[in-house]
Image (cartoon, rainbow, N blue to C red):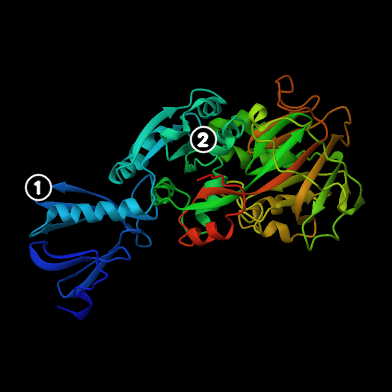
């Protein structure tokens, strides 16, 4: 036996076992490694990274494992970064001891035990139910995670569910959907009277919609593909990442955003392309071409409080943010960050504008790297402004959003802001016709003579303000998340998986 297989005082348990009919010395180390020698080769599995769970089958213990897939291997319709394998061993003695130590170590990792799963069967290509059954549920079962499953039946259903749920029953919420259900869940939790307690409940994302910008942003930062396989394993592992949350206000009305706010071309494409939803994600590219050919420009003004290093953008301006009358959190839920920005040096940019895009995370959708410099918890939002631009150049810029190189264009103004005010106006050529304000794929406001302008919106097509609060969570596969959590512990103790 090799020296590194000898019993160490730091080992949790060591014993002789059968593996593939051969005797071997198996060790579970204190740092969570299962180690053994097979056919003369040293083997090991990480309890933290590789092991989902285990079951007892007679005298054998079957350990359920995920391993990184070799490059070029494809497993059919649903692809991913990991494949499932089993490691089976038979202890000669003390099977109960092995089971106890394996369970004890897995429990020490703080992984979720019970999750509320919200499946949106109507989003994207309507594959959420199939993705959940074939890709997501088997992995949760292998990890012995209990699931309570609810399908959303209509818009804002997810928000209704989380506003009335008993948060003490679960270790997290999982949205098998696009970004829309995530936003509903976040707003529902923040509107609860017990929002401080509710926000300790993490939210997880499994991509099954049209955009999937949040989960793409989370997985891409750690080199994983945006797919159900990788997202589910990330949730099972229980790692969390902080994410800033923006509060969009207009008078007493509030909307909480984790992705973006758009006005002009981008909002028009996002919302007006709904008429082509049957095309799936292709509807965006199809309608974008139409909108560029018949390009619109909007009058208006934006004001912003620049992040350090961006003070030279725009022109000096004065700004007064709306202040809420004093009221208890218990009555109205989370009220957004305490803003004390009035006496700081605001800047402004006047229109006309082709588009104004405010982003919280790098990816707006799976194929759109909107804000390549965006960070998850820096306390700033990334502002992208496009004014006048030739149509052929604009068409090229839209293609460049897949790589994020559009922000290098001299036609693009790209900066970071701490607070933002939008004063939207009408079309340059038709002042009586106004636009759409879009946040996280939802219509905040519809101006006069816009698409579906007869439908009620949350806000009016008028001045609104955006402030950002730092330190909300998301699940991710980042192995450095625990150190990251400690470094930001002083921020709000709220989570988004």
- Which type of secondary structure does the marked residue at label 2 adopt? loop
Q: Which residue bears the numbered disc 1?
A: 58
Q: Which of marks 1 and 2 is in front?
A: 1
Residue 220 or residue 17, whichever sits in front: 17
Mark 2, Cα crowd under 10 Å, few <14 / some 14-19 / many 20+, is: many
Counting from the top left corner in percent of width and height, residue 214 is at 56, 46
Identify whether 60 is placed above or below 283.
Answer: below
Q: Examine the rendering and report whether any part of residue 74 can be seen.
A: no
Q: Is residue 352 left or right of residue 233?
A: right
Quarter assignment of residue 8: bottom left
Counting from the top left corner in percent of width and height, residue 75 is at 33, 50
Q: Is residue 86 left or right of residue 399?
A: left
Q: In this view, does 22 lie to the left or right of 315?
A: left
Q: Residue at x 86, y 46 (%)?
A: 342
Counting from the top left corner in percent of width and height, residue 282 is at 57, 40
The label shown at residue 124 is: 2
Residue 43 or residue 17, whichever sits in front: 17
Mark 1, Cα crowd under 10 Å, few <14 / some 14-19 / many 20+, is: few
The label shown at residue 374 is: none
- Which type of secondary structure does the marked residue at label 1 adopt? loop
Q: From the image, which quarter does the N terminus lie in? A: bottom left
Query: Which tag, 1 or 2, sits closer to the chain's start?
Result: 1
Residue 494 or residue 269, whichever sits in front: 494
Q: Residue at x 81, y 51 (%)?
A: 305
Residue 250 or residue 429, whichever sits in front: 250
Counting from the top left corner in percent of width and height, residue 315 is at 91, 54
Q: Examine the rendering and report whether any part of residue 420 can be seen.
A: yes
Q: Residue furthest bottom?
A: 3
């Amino acid at each position: 036996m090799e020296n590194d297989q000898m019993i160490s005082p730091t080992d949790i348990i060591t014993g002789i076992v059968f593996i593939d009919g051969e005797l071997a010395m198996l060790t579970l180390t204190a740092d969570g490694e299962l180690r053994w020698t097979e056919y003369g080769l040293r083997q090991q599995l990480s309890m933290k990274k590789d092991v989902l769970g285990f079951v007892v089958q007679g005298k054998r213990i079957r350990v359920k494992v995920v391993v990184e897939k070799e490059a070029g291997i494809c497993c059919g319709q649903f692809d991913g970064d990991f494949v499932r394998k089993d490691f089976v061993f038979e202890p000669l003695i003390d099977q109960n001891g092995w089971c106890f130590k394996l369970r004890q170590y897995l429990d020490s990792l703080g992984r979720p035990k019970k999750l509320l799963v919200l499946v949106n069967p109507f989003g994207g290509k309507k594959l959420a139910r199939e993705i959940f059954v074939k890709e997501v549920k088997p992995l949760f079962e292998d990890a012995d995670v209990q699931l309570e499953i609810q399908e959303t039946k209509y818009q804002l259903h997810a928000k209704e569910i989380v506003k009335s749920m008993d948060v003490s029953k679960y270790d997290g919420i999982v949205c098998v959907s696009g970004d829309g259900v995530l936003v509903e869940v976040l707003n529902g939790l923040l509107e609860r009277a017990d929002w401080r307690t509710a926000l300790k409940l993490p939210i997880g994302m499994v991509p099954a919609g049209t955009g999937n910008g949040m989960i793409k942003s989370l997985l891409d930062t750690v080199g994983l593909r945006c797919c159900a396989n990788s997202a589910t394993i990330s949730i099972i592992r229980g790692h969390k990442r902080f994410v800033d949350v923006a509060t969009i206000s207009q008078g007493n009305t509030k909307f909480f955003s984790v992705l973006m706010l758009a006005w002009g071309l981008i909002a028009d494409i996002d919302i007006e392309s709904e008429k082509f939803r049957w095309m799936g994600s292709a509807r965006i590219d199809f309608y974008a071409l139409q909108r560029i050919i018949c390009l619109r420009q909007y009058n208006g003004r934006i004001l912003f409080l620049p992040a350090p290093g961006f003070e030279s953008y725009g022109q000096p301006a004065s700004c007064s943010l709306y202040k809420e009358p004093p009221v208890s959190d218990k009555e109205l839920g989370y009220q957004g960050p305490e803003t004390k920005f009035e006496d700081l040096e605001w800047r402004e940019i006047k229109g006309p504008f082709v588009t104004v895009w405010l982003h919280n995370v790098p990816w707006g959708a799976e194929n759109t790297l909107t804000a390549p410099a965006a960070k998850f918890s820096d306390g700033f939002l990334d502002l992208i402004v496009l004014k006048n631009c030739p149509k052929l150049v604009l068409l090229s810029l839209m293609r460049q959003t897949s790589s994020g190189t559009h922000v290098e264009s001299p036609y693009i103004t790209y900066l970071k802001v701490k607070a933002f005010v939008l004063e939207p106006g009408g079309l340059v050529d038709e002042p009586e016709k106004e636009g759409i304000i879009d946040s996280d794929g939802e219509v905040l406001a519809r101006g006069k003579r816009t698409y579906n302008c007869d439908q009620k919106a949350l806000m009016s097509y008028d001045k609104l303000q955006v402030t950002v609060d730092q330190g909300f969570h998301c699940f991710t596969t980042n192995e450095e998340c625990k150190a990251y959590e400690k470094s930001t512990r002083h921020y709000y103790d709220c989570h988004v998986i």
